[in-house]
Amino acid sequence: MNIRMTYLYRDAGNYKHWYDVIFPNKSEKSVSELTEKIKKQLISGEYFEQELAPMPMDLDEDFDEELDHSWLEFHSFKEVDAPAQVDQDIMSFISNLHDGFK
């Protein structure tokens, strides 16, 4: 089964923009295992930098660089019987989160 990751962007006005992406799960890790692993890699256990996201975000034209930020908030994983949208394996993505904060 592949893994759908759901995450969101909150702008300075607290408007929420939801996103999801489906990763291959070559190691066949469970949702609980993946959730435990990703939370160890995230900023404060919930955030990661937008530039590390596997798919581009469509930010509003109202994006204000002085007020808004580039952090995304991890929400959840779910096993899905749908094709992967990216080539990067979920475990590789999780590992790269840590590398991105060095």
Image (spheres, grey):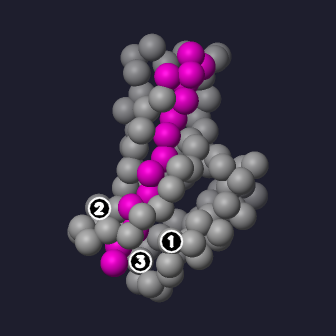
Q: Is residue 10 magenta?
A: yes
Percent x, y of residue 92: 52, 72
Magenta residues, as a range?
A: 1-15
The residue under label 1 is 31
Q: Secondary structure at mark 1?
A: helix
Instruction: Answer whether labels 3 and 2 touch (C-beta < 8 Å).
Output: no
Based on the displayed image, in which of its 4 quarters is residue 84 positioned?
Answer: bottom left
Q: Looking at the magenta stretch, what is its main secondary structure?
A: strand
Secondary structure beneath label 3? loop
Q: Residue furthest bottom?
A: 27
**Circle 3 is placed at which residue position?**
25
Indicate whether residue 93 is drawn in magenta: no
Q: Nearer the viewer, mark 1 or mark 2?
A: 1
Place of residue 62 in the rendered image (x, y in percent of width and height, measured from the top left)? 45, 14
Residue 101 visible in image? yes
Instruction: Write the residue at 66% across / 49% down.
Output: 46
Q: Separation of disc 3 and disc 1 at Cα?
A: 10 Å
Q: Amino acid at mark 3?
A: Asn
Q: Residue at x 41, y 77 (%)?
A: 25
